[in-house]
Amino acid sequence: MTPRTSSQVADRSRVSIIAIDGPASSGKSTIGKELARILDFLYFDSGVMYRAVTCRALSLGLDVSDEKSITDLAERLRIEVRPATVPDGRDNDLLADGADITWKIRAPEVDAAVSTVAAFPGVRQALNRHLRSIGSRGRIVMVGRDIGTVVMPEADVKIYLMASPEERALRRFRERGGRGEPADYAEILASIRKRDALDSSRETAPLRLAPDAHFINSDGITIPEVVDQVLSLVRAEQRQA
Ligand code: CDP
């Protein structure tokens, strides 16, 4: 990514929390990481928490539709995100009860089960406690489904990032291929559509546009263009502050 001049970088003093929500593979993580890099903010992907609980539940052989056992697991699971110790393309190490699950959380089995797990109110309550304590430090870009609506409604800038299901499936297909994993476009598209439906229709904290969020459709726009759009919004917010 091209380095930016100081005039392109927003004044860092006023905007402290940036929330980016949107459906699967809408570009939240790519955009979020780049923004955090430019602003020198922490980047945090809340989805890894839901994926960690799901991944652990599957490896323990739990029934992911059993609300009680999954909620108990979410309450007691020790999830740690720490700087990467393995040079295999990861951004961080992700540990659950001490086990390295950094790549396991991206498996298709986790994709297929995570929205069921994320719909349980007790799971959300347990994870939101962690997310709020991470977010309250400020100077953060947090991405997810309900960051601007539920986790940090006080966020200074809220973005809702969208792209068509076909475009998003293509991105995920390429991501998997890039990691040398088998990938089937039609299966990925079906899984994304299913997750969209579950995430948008659940009762607790459904995926939806916060009234004060900025909607960005990233179909056919490059990553630097989206990043520039968000940086303009950050600057506009600072002028108003
Ligand atoms: O990377 P991708 O966009 O596919 O998904 P993710 O951000 O890793 O999130 C995985 C799943 O966790 C989502 O499909 C949601 O069911 C759930 N999730 C959530 O409910 N709330 C969040 N703040 C983040 C993720």
Image: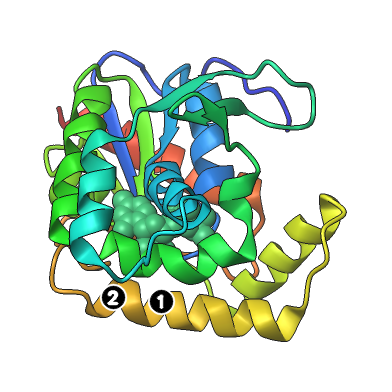
Q: Looking at this rendering, what residue extends furthest in the right direction?
A: 180
Q: Is residue 163 above or below residue 241?
A: below
Front in this rendered view, residue 130 or 214: 130
Q: Quadrant of the N terminus?
A: top right
Q: Looking at this rendering, what residue extends furthest in the front direction?
A: 61
- Dot 1: element: helix
Q: Position of residue 178 (x, y in %)?
A: 84, 53
**Residue visible at 18% across and 41% down in the picture:** 126
**Residue visible at 36% across and 66% down in the picture:** 64
Tell me the amino acid under the disc marked 1.
Asp
Proximity of marks 2 and 1: CB atoms separated by less than 8 Å? yes
Q: Which residue is mark 1?
A: 196
Residue density around tag 2, few if under 14, some if 14–19, many if 20 or more, within 10 Å: some
**Disc 2 and disc 1: Cα gap in Å?**
6 Å
Front in this rendered view, residue 192 or 49: 49
Whereabouts is ligand 1, in terms of quadrant? bottom left
Q: Quadrant of the C terminus?
A: top left
For disc 2, does the CB lie below 8 Å from ligand 1?
A: no
Q: Which residue is mark 2?
A: 200
Q: In the displayed structure, does residue 178 sit left or right of residue 116?
A: right
Residue density around tag 1, few if under 14, some if 14–19, many if 20 or more, within 10 Å: some
| Image quadrant assignment for residue 48 | top left
Q: In the displayed structure, does residue 111 sit left or right of residue 215?
A: right
Identify the coloring.
Answer: rainbow
Q: Is residue 213 above or below residue 9?
A: below
Residue 124 seen in this snapshot = yes
Q: In the displayed structure, does residue 188 sit left or right of residue 155?
A: right
| Image quadrant assignment for residue 203 | bottom left
Q: Position of residue 187 (x, y in %)?
A: 67, 82
